[in-house]
Amino acid sequence: MLNNLTHSLTDMHKLLSLPLALVITMGIALWPACKKSDFENVELADHTAEFAFPLFTTDLLLKDLLFSTLNDTLSGDTVFVNADNTMTLFYSGDVAEKKASDIFNFLDTLVPIPMFDSIATNPIEGPDGVSIRIADLKEGGIAFRLRNTTPDKLTGYFEVTQMSFQGIPFKAPFDIDAGEDWFSGIIDLAGYHLESANDTLTFKYFAFRPDGVRIRVPNPGFGLDVVVVPQYLKFSYVEGYWGYQYYALTRDTIEIDINQTELKGDLKVKSPKVTMRISNSWGFPTRGVIKYLSFIGQGGEEIPLESTVFQYDSFDYVDFAYPSWLLGEQGQSKFTDITLDESNSNIADIFNSQPTRLIYEVNGLSNAQLDPSLIGFITDESVISLQLRVELLLEGSIKNFGAEQTLNLDFGEFGSLDSAGISDVEFKLVTENGTPISSDMQIYFRDATQNYIDSLFIGGPKEVIRAAPINNEGVTTGITRTEEFIPMQAARFDRIRLAKDAFLKTSFSTAEEGNTFVKLLATDKIVVKMGIKVKKRL
Amino acid sequence: MNFNYILGLSLAFLCSFPLSAQQELMLHSLPDVWHSTSTNPAFFPENKRIAIGLPGIGLDAAHSGDVSYKDIFVKKGDRTEIDFTNALDKLDPSNTVFFEQRIETASFGIRLPGKIWLQAGHANRLSGSVTYPKTLPSLIWDGNAQYIGQTVDIALQTDISNWNEWSVGLAKGFGNLQVGVRGKYLTGTTALLSDYNRQKATITTSEDIYQLSLATNYAFYASSIISAFDTAGLGFDLTLGELKGKAFSKNTGFALDLGVQYKLNEKLTLDLALLDLGGKITWKEQSNYFASQGEYQYEGVSLPGADIINGSDSLDFSTKLDTLNDIFKFQKTAQEFETTLPLRGYLGGNYAFSKRWSFGVGAYFQKRAEENATVAAGASVRWKPLQWISLGAMYSVNERSAANLGFHLVLKPGPVQLYFASDNLLNAFSVKNSPAVNLRTGLSLIF
């Protein structure tokens, strides 16, 4: 039995050995396919991938650019968009003004008026050619002195015939013992009304003895025993006759800020117009007499203005508009515009030489028409002012007009990006320009203390914006697209993305290298956009 | 009937069909192996009464084109690196990964008097395909700069199901004809199915300044595999469902297998089977529909021109890249869905030349929903040097390859049946170097 069993086992061994061997063999063969350890310690292989994505897009409207550039340095400008989308720049310069009270002063004096008699008539002191018939006083005073050299007590009053206060005639009473020296003190005349038919003031005194007899106080010598002393009378309103009279009006300098901006370069405007606006609240006709009118150029040279407008004796030249007494226009201002353009002056040539200031000296001539019945007035507020207003239709040419601007930078996530794996980047700068202006540009990247880090373009500024095509009227007819590829190594990119500001230096020229006049339209636009390709080791 | 005539006709017939990458012909050519009953319910080992099926596994997987494991998983010292560099060059514009896995856990068969066979069993099946465009891995691996000015497709299509089959079968002999039928109760474990009506996902990198445009009209169904699809971060965060090996679930369905085997004479046998007829599973448990639709543009930061001109603001490059990550903002809705089992069929013939030698021909087809039918055909030879050893070889062709050399080894010491079969021997032993793998092995006891 044991032998049989042994034999059976032996047979079984033989029977199973081969299958087992085959299974083991198959297992070994399959094992490489199924090893679980293949999936432990799995890592991503090093490789380089390149990603492209957009960075930014911005639309720059020409009118915004103009508004900003001019507002930065000019205080009184406006850019007006016309119906046809052209733009007109209106710039108003400083106002030079002259108050009437600077020229016309009446009884603004301390000179005493001796009364040798009980009545004394004095002309109202004032400028030549002016006869006052009505005045309202706002300030000043009057004083009287009477030294009683008689043996009697004297009572009475001083009177100024033409003066009244709310309808009550002016009286300064006195009561003086014999031998006494009486002084009225300064009597405030603010609010007093003065009416004089012949430009005079009449001072009277009425001195009575105790028995009621009116006497005349002796006033020998210089007449200081009885004296009237006006105290710097100031008028709020003066009305009277203004005769034909020259007087110095104003000499002044007007800065032309539009040519003192940061924009430097050759600018030519097609049809500049300069308007001299005279604002006049003097109540009588005044004619300006130009004694001197010249522009000063960029280099300090004098450029005289030549115009047919200022020939004061020509039919083209008229008095400044003025508020009329006859029409009851007291308190109003009237405006006179004298426009200089290429049809009546050399202003176009002057303006395109970019003058920095205007120097002028103007005299006034009142009542140039010699009207004998002219009644005029002035108030303490009356002024005559001159303002230069420049009107530029933005049509012209510029060549190498430079501008500088600093922009704060915040690169956001890019600033803190782990650039360890970045091998290089390439920026793509695209501009789509619908304006007739080209631009060279360079951007300087600076750190927090404005120290230079790097520049965008190597080798100097690049023309990144090319002018759009124009027709023969200088109006753009399409869009010019420019692409600029800016490759950058990782190390350089690392420096730039730490920048805190960008100093932008640009130079503008109009189409055809600035040799042709172009029209700048409010709808003109430049689209600037940038994308980036980044090659990164992963 | 002349054997040569039948063989030639079969080959001519088979070659007229489009050829496919998937096949499992070798096991079908072994009707005496118990596990081959999975290919035809009419099969039952001859002259045996009881069959107890022990675990067996079959795997059939392929990747279109020539991409292999080694092209992606590269050995570098003691670690493995994932490197798509080589693989990308081998990819086609559209690529598909197929896989079929069948795990026979246990089965039982008994021959009853009256030429009746009963069988029952359990198996777990994983069947699927993933189709992806070359541009997707290329985009991820090499970046989008290579596609400037182009619109590229990045949409995946998937049809993956994992389910359990609980089968009961009956076969009866009618003279030389054996007819078998098998009903299968299906319980789904996991599924991932693309909505074939919504398969658009494209990305465009503009030539202008590389603006990115992403368009999606993309949806899929998932059951117990993805419970959330979060793209709020920089990537795609999948929250996987609990992939427990659930034997039963609410995801149920049925399928039917039909088969016949006809013995023309002592030497020649023909067989035909249709498997997974009407097979579908309705997914109810943890089943959701994920859909993404929209167009998303990323044009970089828009800097107000007025601010630049006025210098009144910093140039702030804080990007909006986070919004990019929400482009595939999937909306999840609970929804039932159905998957259909791929219909399969076998046609075969076997000629016993002698006691030791036999020749066979076979054809296999498979038809998935929304895909073309795939067909493979082969011719085999079997040698039994000993009663308990069988060796065989097969030459087969399919769509992907016209040079598949299969092999089998069956060992039957006593009641034990151990087999190993592959339709492509080289792939079986060099999985890493091949874009396809096909192998089947199992164990059973036959009395």
Image (spheres, coloured by chain):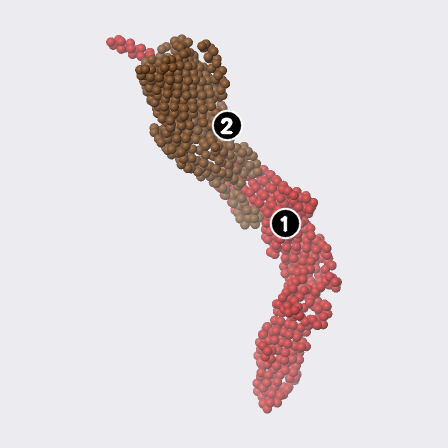
Relative to A387, residue B52 above or below: above
- Residue B140, image x, y percentages: 49, 32
For residue A211, side relative to residue B319 (left or right): right
Q: Quadrant of residue A143?
A: bottom right
Look at 35% across and 17% down and name the residue there: B172
- Look at chain B in the picture and name its colour: brown
Which chain does the red colour mark? A
Q: Quadrant of residue B246?
A: top left
Please, which chain is the residue tagged with disc 2 on? B
- Residue A261, image x, y percentages: 62, 52
For the residue pair A531 and B334, the one nearer the viewer reads as B334
Q: CA distance from mark 1 to mark 2?
A: 55 Å
Q: Residue furthest front?
A: B174
Look at 47% across and 22% down and name the residue there: B374
Give the structural element (helix, strand or loop) at label 1.
Answer: loop
Q: Amino acid at mark 1?
A: Asn
Residue marked by disc 2: B94
- On the question of residue B138 being in view, the answer is no
Label 2: few (<14), some (14–19) or many (≥20) C-alpha neighbours in 10 Å = some
Give the structural element (helix, strand or loop) at label 2.
Answer: strand
Residue B8 has which mark? Answer: none
Residue A85 has which mark? Answer: 1
Relative to A501, residue A75 above or below: below
